[in-house]
Amino acid sequence: MSTIELFGRVDEKGKLEFEPPANLTPGAVRIIIEAVDSEAEAADALLRMAKKAHEDHLAGLTKDLDLDDPELFGD
């Protein structure tokens, strides 16, 4: 079984809108609709980035931020 992920949205009237993918082979499909909480996904992404940054720091892979470094802002 191969997985094809479709993205769409529900409009103000409750109608599902999405673009079906091209070149699907004939056969049975299983469709699962999952509500997306954008704020929760953003918070989860920030948490993952913070954990990764902390791991990098503990592993000695980071350096101190020097706000006076002219290369920092592309000057």
Image (cartoon, grey):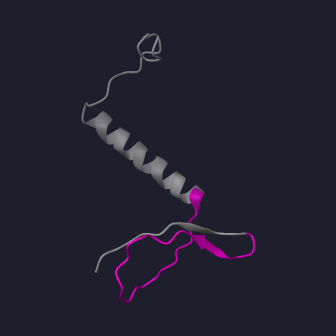
Q: Is residue 42 above or below residue 30?
A: above
Q: Main secondary structure of the magenta part?
A: loop
Residue positioned most to the front: 23
Numbered label tally: 0
Q: Nearer the viewer, residue 32 or 49?
A: 32
Q: Specify whether 5 is left or right of 15.
A: left
Residue 45 location (% of width, % of height) = 46, 51
Picture residue at 55% right of the left edge, 59% below the top = 40
Residue 30 sits inside the magenta stretch: yes
Residue 60 location (% of width, % of height) = 25, 30
Residue 69 location (% of width, % of height) = 42, 11
Q: Nearer the viewer, residue 8 or 59?
A: 8
Picture residue at 44% right of the left edge, 10% below the top = 70
Picture residue at 38% right of the left edge, 89% below the top = 28
Picture residue at 36% right of the left edge, 85% below the top = 26
Residue 47 location (% of width, % of height) = 45, 49
Q: Specify whether 58 is left or right of 45.
A: left
Quadrant of the image containing the N terminus: bottom left
Residue 33 sits inside the magenta stretch: yes
Q: Is residue 17 above or below residue 67?
A: below
Stretch in magenta: 12-38
Residue positioned most to the right: 13
Q: Specify whether 13 is left or right of 34.
A: right
Using the rendered view, name the quadrant where residue 18 is placed: bottom right
Q: Nearer the viewer, residue 48 or 13?
A: 13
Q: Is residue 28 above or below residue 39?
A: below
